[in-house]
Image (cartoon, helix red, strand yellow):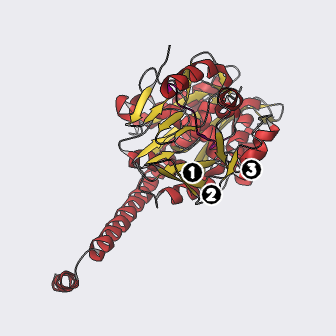
């Protein structure tokens, strides 16, 4: 039984949804599953863009056979060699010995390492090379470290489709839907997309920025990623999200409160702070127990919010281990440009607060720590009420300052876009129109 969706008149999705795998890369929970996307172009030549994970190989091969009917498979373009997209290469070549594999030099090295026999059927491409399949001509753009060193993307100059490999992907199964306008992405998908990006690609923000720079020069009309929905509307929305994530700029001014509590006293302090902030008008708040929330979710929320409050008990004269693990993930994934607040607790030799502050200062770039700190001796008391109010007031003040900075940045971006549009409009004017335009600006 085939399961195929038409992407354009001659381009088809032949991927599959995985509901059974519990851990993506055997580390990140995926309770809503994941899709493995593969695409076939039916032109004068037939072209397969990437394969799928071994776990859905049977479905993929059935879909491939259905779309090809009795046509040969002329080419297979491999943008990324990670096994969740490349595991079925060998099965495709067994069934289609006529196929030429198009990829780059480093990718072919990885194919050899994974045991795929492509000798005698390799077509090696470099940055900017093109291939014509009939009506469709594609060009290849390298996307090193997004998020493997051999990664590239393929742009179809004929229809504006970007086969974007792991870029613009997301956790979550498609469930019959394929396109971004078939789902409520901002309600149902953005958390999956953020958690996918921040945990899988987040470490490589500068490389994502390089790819986004290349993408801006191409007239892209559609993103065809290897996971998640195909984007054919409102591409600017999704590009903006990736731009913020890859520059480590918070999506929202809000507060993420992460607590590590052994017997409930530190948890009480975290909840008390959340209540005070709401009373003071700050309601964009999420509270997490670091011991019960998988770190991949915590990382994603840290990329989302501008302010992170760490509330940790002291454990063996150190930071509570799970909280320390969370901080380690922020360091590894290069999180920066955040404002932190600290709540510490302990029955003797309270050290968690100073150690968390030291960790932030030593390992996270461009971060600021609010001076007010809440120090709890075993359980909260009246003096902590005063400290809690001071910390809440400083958070409110800090968020107001961040909002001013954000507004100024958005105004600058809007002005730059307006100036760029004006320059483009002037280029299209005749000499007479240009003179009249400048004259009107002088007289304005």
Read off the magenta span: 69-80
Q: Is residue 411 magenta?
A: no
232 relative to 27 in the view: left or right: left
Position in image of residue 145 (x %, y %): 67, 50
Residue 144 seen: yes
**Dominant secondary structure (helix, strand or loop) of the stretch shown in magenta:** loop
Identify the residue at the far right of this view.
316
Inter-mark Cα distance, 2 to 3: 35 Å
Per the rendering, the mark at residue 422 is none
In the rendered structure, find residue 366 and report the number of the disc placed on it.
Answer: 2
Q: Nearer the viewer, residue 417 or 345?
A: 417
Marks 1 and 3, the one that precedes in the sequence: 3
Q: Which residue is mark 3?
A: 106
**Is 215 positioned to the left or the right of 98 in the image?**
left
Tell me which residue sits at (56%, 38%) in the image. 49
Location of residue 219 (image quadrant): bottom left
Q: Which residue is mark 1?
A: 246
Circle nearer the viewer, 2 or 3: 3
Pick the front one: 86 or 271 = 86
């Amino acid at each position: 039984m085939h399961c195929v969706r038409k992407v354009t008149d001659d381009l088809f999705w032949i991927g599959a949804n995985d509901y059974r795998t519990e851990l993506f890369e055997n580390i990140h929970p995926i309770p809503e599953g994941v899709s493995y996307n593969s695409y076939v172009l039916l032109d004068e030549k037939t072209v397969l863009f990437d394969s799928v994970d071994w776990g859905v190989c049977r479905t993929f091969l059935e879909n491939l056979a259905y779309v090809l009917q009795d046509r040969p498979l002329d080419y297979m373009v491999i943008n990324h060699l990670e096994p969740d997209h490349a595991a079925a290469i060998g099965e495709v070549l067994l069934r289609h010995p006529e196929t030429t594999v198009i990829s780059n030099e480093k990718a072919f090295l990885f194919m050899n390492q994974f045991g795929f026999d492509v000798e005698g059927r390799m077509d090696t491409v470099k940055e900017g090379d093109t291939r014509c399949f009939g009506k469709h001509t594609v060009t290849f753009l390298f996307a090193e470290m997004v998020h493997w060193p051999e990664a590239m993307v393929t742009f179809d100059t004929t229809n504006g489709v970007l086969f974007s490999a792991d870029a613009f992907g997301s956790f979550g199964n498609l469930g019959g839907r394929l396109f971004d306008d078939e789902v409520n992405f901002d309600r149902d998908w953005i958390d999956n997309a953020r958690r996918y990006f921040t945990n899988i690609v987040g470490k490589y923000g500068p490389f994502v920025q390089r790819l986004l720079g290349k993408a801006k020069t191409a007239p892209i009309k559609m993103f065809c990623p290897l996971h998640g929905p195909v984007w054919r509307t409102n591409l600017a929305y999704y590009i903006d999200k990736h731009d913020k994530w890859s520059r480590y700029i918070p999506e929202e001014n809000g507060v993420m409160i992460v607590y590590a509590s052994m017997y409930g006293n530190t948890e009480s302090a975290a909840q008390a702070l959340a209540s005070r902030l709401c009373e003071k008008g700050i309601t964009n708040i999420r509270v997490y127990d670091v011991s019960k929330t998988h770190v991949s979710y915590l990382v994603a929320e840290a990329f989302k919010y501008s302010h992170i409050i760490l509330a940790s008990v002291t454990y063996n004269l150190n930071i509570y281990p799970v909280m320390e693990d969370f901080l380690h993930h922020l360091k590894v994934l290069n999180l920066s440009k955040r404002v932190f607040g600290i709540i510490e607790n302990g029955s003797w030799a309270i050290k968690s607060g100073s150690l968390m502050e030291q960790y932030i200062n030593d390992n996270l770039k461009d971060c600021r720590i609010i001076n007010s700190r809440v120090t709890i001796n075993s359980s909260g008391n009246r003096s902590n009420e005063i400290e809690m109010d001071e910390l809440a007031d400083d958070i409110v003040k800090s968020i107001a300052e961040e909002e001013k900075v954000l507004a100024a940045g958005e105004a600058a971006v809007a002005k730059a876009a307006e100036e760029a549009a004006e320059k483009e409009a002037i280029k299209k004017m005749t000499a007479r129109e240009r003179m009249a335009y400048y004259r009107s600006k002088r007289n304005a």
